[in-house]
Image (spheres, rainbow, N blue to C red):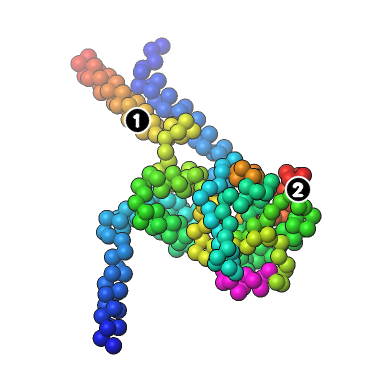
């Protein structure tokens, strides 16, 4: 009986440490960046659907194999397309999405510059 | 009349955003994996549902001109609807191999399902935890994938096979 209790305690104490804190954080980050394809606006992290559960299993396997986040994303993109990730990779189809914030930032800066210069000129006149 | 630079910038802003929204409205946001047609399947090994020692790999699939990989489950009602098409396909055509992958199902239920409706499959494999389905880009049951001997996906059918898709498959493999 004591032996059984010993093994129970040992197995119980190890079960919670299958993934270290770092791995757990990495898993959560990956889940959050993956879209649940069968849910309405939910990430894999938020969803309890069958599809999300399967994706979580596959991601866990790949993290255990030592694959990087990018490797896992490109594997899933090869199977489901770019739609599976919330943060898309830069390509000719979506370059606008990436440069738009910088363009807006630049044009906005120009706008503020010209307006403030005009205001200064008006004041001096 | 003098037009100030700030007005030009605001005008460019407005036109630019209108163009982006106009283009965005025209985009089709319904997700499907049909755009993945042309990809190759790889790194796959499937264990037979009733014999853990027997399995098929991608090398076995290269032996047939065409292979239809069908994901099914006994608990899936639409799978019953498409089953007759699969039976007809296996009876009518010898050019195509049909591989059934039993998705997240109990072995006994899957065997009973095939006993009841007939077995159109050349090989029935088990995907107990669904991991194999991810290798094929599956996100619902039933789904079917038609591949050629180079393991390239020729057609992907999301949902049950219907008459139109059945005829499409026949056209492709004739």
Q: Quadrant of the C terminus of chain A?
A: top left
Q: Nearer the viewer, residue A19 or B52?
A: B52
Q: Give the farthest residue toward the top.
A: B1
Residue A68 coordinates in the image, percent (x, y): 35, 47
Residue A103 coordinates in the image, percent (x, y): 37, 28
Q: In the picture provided, is B84 more to the left or to the right than A78?
A: right
Q: Nearer the viewer, residue A87 or B145?
A: B145
Q: In the picture provided, is A76 more to the left or to the right than B106?
A: left
Image disc number at residue A102 = 1
Q: Quadrant of residue B1?
A: top left
How far, Cα to Cα, is label 2 from label 1?
Answer: 52 Å
Output the chain of dot 2: B
Residue B106 on the magenta span: yes
Residue B18 appearing in the image: no
Residue A113 coordinates in the image, percent (x, y): 27, 23
Image disc number at residue B170 = 2
- Mark 1 secondary-structure assignment: helix
Residue lying at 42% horizontally and 35% vertically, measured from the top left: A90
Residue lying at 31% horizontally and 61% vertically, measured from the top left: A19
Residue A120 appearing in the image: yes
Magenta span covers which residues? B104-114
Q: Give the farthest residue toward the front.
A: B53
Tell us which disc is closer to us: 2 or 1: 2
Q: Give the farthest residue toward the right.
A: B92
Q: Residues within 10 Å of mark 2 (few under 14, many from 20)?
A: some
Identify whether A69 is placed above or below B126: above
Residue lying at 55% horizontally and 39% vertically, measured from the top left: B27
Q: Quadrant of residue B25?
A: top right
Q: Quadrant of the N terminus of chain A?
A: bottom left
């Amino acid at each position: 009986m004591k032996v059984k209790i010993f093994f129970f305690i040992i197995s119980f104490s190890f079960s919670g440490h299958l993934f270290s804190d770092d791995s757990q954080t990495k898993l959560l980050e990956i889940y959050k960046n993956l879209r649940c394809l069968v849910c309405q606006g939910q990430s894999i992290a938020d969803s309890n659907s069958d599809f999300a559960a399967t994706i979580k299993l596959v991601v866990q396997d790949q993290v255990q194999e030592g694959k990087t986040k990018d490797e896992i994303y490109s594997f899933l993109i090869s199977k489901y397309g770019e739609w599976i990730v919330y943060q898309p990779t830069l390509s000719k189809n979506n370059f606008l999405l990436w440069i738009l914030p910088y363009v807006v930032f630049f044009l906005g800066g120009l706008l503020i510059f010209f307006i403030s210069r005009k205001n200064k000129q008006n004041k001096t006149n | 009349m003098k037009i100030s630079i700030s007005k030009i910038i605001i005008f460019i802003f407005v036109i630019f955003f209108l163009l982006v929204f106009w283009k965005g409205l025209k985009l089709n946001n319904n997700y499907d994996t049909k755009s993945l047609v042309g990809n190759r399947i790889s790194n796959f090994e499937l264990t037979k549902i009733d014999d853990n020692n027997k399995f098929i790999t991608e090398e076995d699939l290269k032996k047939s001109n065409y292979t239809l990989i069908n994901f099914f489950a006994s608990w899936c009602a639409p799978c019953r609807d498409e089953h007759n098409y699969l039976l007809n396909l296996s009876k009518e055509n010898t050019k195509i191999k049909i591989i059934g992958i039993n998705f997240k199902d109990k072995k006994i239920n899957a065997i009973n399902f095939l006993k009841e409706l007939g077995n159109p499959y050349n090989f029935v494999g088990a995907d107990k935890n669904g991991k194999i389905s991810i290798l094929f880009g599956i996100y619902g049951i039933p789904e079917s994938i038609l591949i050629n001997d180079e393991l390239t996906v020729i057609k992907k059918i999301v949902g049950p096979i219907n008459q139109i898709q059945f005829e499409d498959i026949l056209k492709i493999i004739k």
